[in-house]
Amino acid sequence: MSFPPLLEDLIRSLKVLPGVGAKSAQRMAFSLLEGDRLGGQKLAKTLAKAVDGIQHCTSCRNYTQSELCDICANPRRELNGEICVVATPSDVAAIEQTGHFQGRYFVLMGLLSPLDGIGPDELGLDRLANLMATTEVKELILATNPTVEGEATAHYIAEIAQQHNVRVSRIAQGVPVGGELEMVDGKTLGHAFSGRKTL
Amino acid sequence: MSFPPLLEDLIRSLKVLPGVGAKSAQRMAFSLLEGDRLGGQKLAKTLAKAVDGIQHCTSCRNYTQSELCDICANPRRELNGEICVVATPSDVAAIEQTGHFQGRYFVLMGLLSPLDGIGPDELGLDRLANLMATTEVKELILATNPTVEGEATAHYIAEIAQQHNVRVSRIAQGVPVGGELEMVDGKTLGHAFSGRKTL
């Protein structure tokens, strides 16, 4: 390569982004230098600020700029008494958009995965247990992904909740709204049958 | 969405990168905050430095940190008398890696594309003409891509060179080394035949 050192540095640094290899990093660097230097400057500034300023909420572990996130700081949310356990901040955003849930969240920031070294400590489960011991929790709603890791994590947390005598529930699994039965896989269809409701 | 403002800012800023939409930007932001804050900080610093410090070589338009790039600043390269015209800095890097070319480059930073508003001025062709008028150029080698835009640009530059009585050549088109004939498209095969050499 015969790029100037600063450009080499930039290309190397861009490779920390997920899914960005040598070729994409080069394309990104050129595009930042060629098309949009202002956008590049703005990205540099917001990135520096975000890396410094964004931390985890001390109560629910979601991203926040202050000690408590907006949801945990809202007393109406605490009064509701329900805690929804999710894997990532994007799950919180997705659930908030539905407007169906008025309680607080607990963000695991991952799912149990012993092979990757992610155990109960990494998911902050001691903090969740502490929350159940010290505040009034009416119900713990487990909204982890319906995958192997998500199910294992949900089971593990359900046991902790039962030790604290807290009611636990799991979000319903079945056919997605608007989907066609013939396109739905067998396992989902099985869940839809076993979870059927009398009308 | 219910992300803190700094995180929203970061996600919005990441979208200036080519090929990065809302979902990828979110994934990148999470990965920077979760896995690699040090890498994120480094990226912010190098990006700010690069956007400020990298400019175009006043002679060949390639990226450089000083007024002249390393290649243009090398007197041996100028003595050679050949100028290779390419579309992008990556083309320079690719040709340099072969070690086949010992002259200077001229980087167009694009190809003629009237519909996108890219004309001779945007490619710095006045500067190239000036170079041919003021320095001794033995040969202009046109190494733009073998695409419609690349061919059109090569033709246009060839005419300018002929006005300055400079010898012009175009890199050879034919079957790629190591390729199989049955996999090669008809146009390339046609070029390979019309450009055949007597042994």
Image: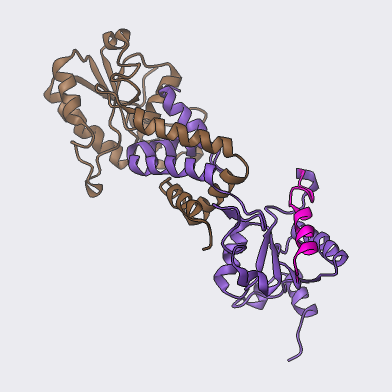
Chain colours: A brown, B purple
How many numbered badges does the structure rendering display? Answer: 0
Q: Residue A153: which quarter of the image?
A: top left
Res A141 visible: yes
Classify B7 as above or below A165: below
Is residue B32 left or right of B149 when viewed as pictured? left
Is residue B2 left or right of B198 when viewed as pictured? left
Asked whether B35 or A50 is in front, the reply is A50
**Magenta region includes residue B118:** yes
Q: Give the quarter of the figure containing the C terminus of chain A.
A: top left
Q: Residue at x 23, y 42 (%)?
A: A118
Q: Residue at x 51, y 63 (%)?
A: A1
* Residue at the bottom extreme, as displayed: B199
The spot of residue A134 in percent (x, y) is 14, 16
Is residue B52 left or right of B115 when viewed as pictured? left
Q: Which residues are magenta?
A: B117-137
Is residue A102 left or right of A60 when viewed as pictured? right
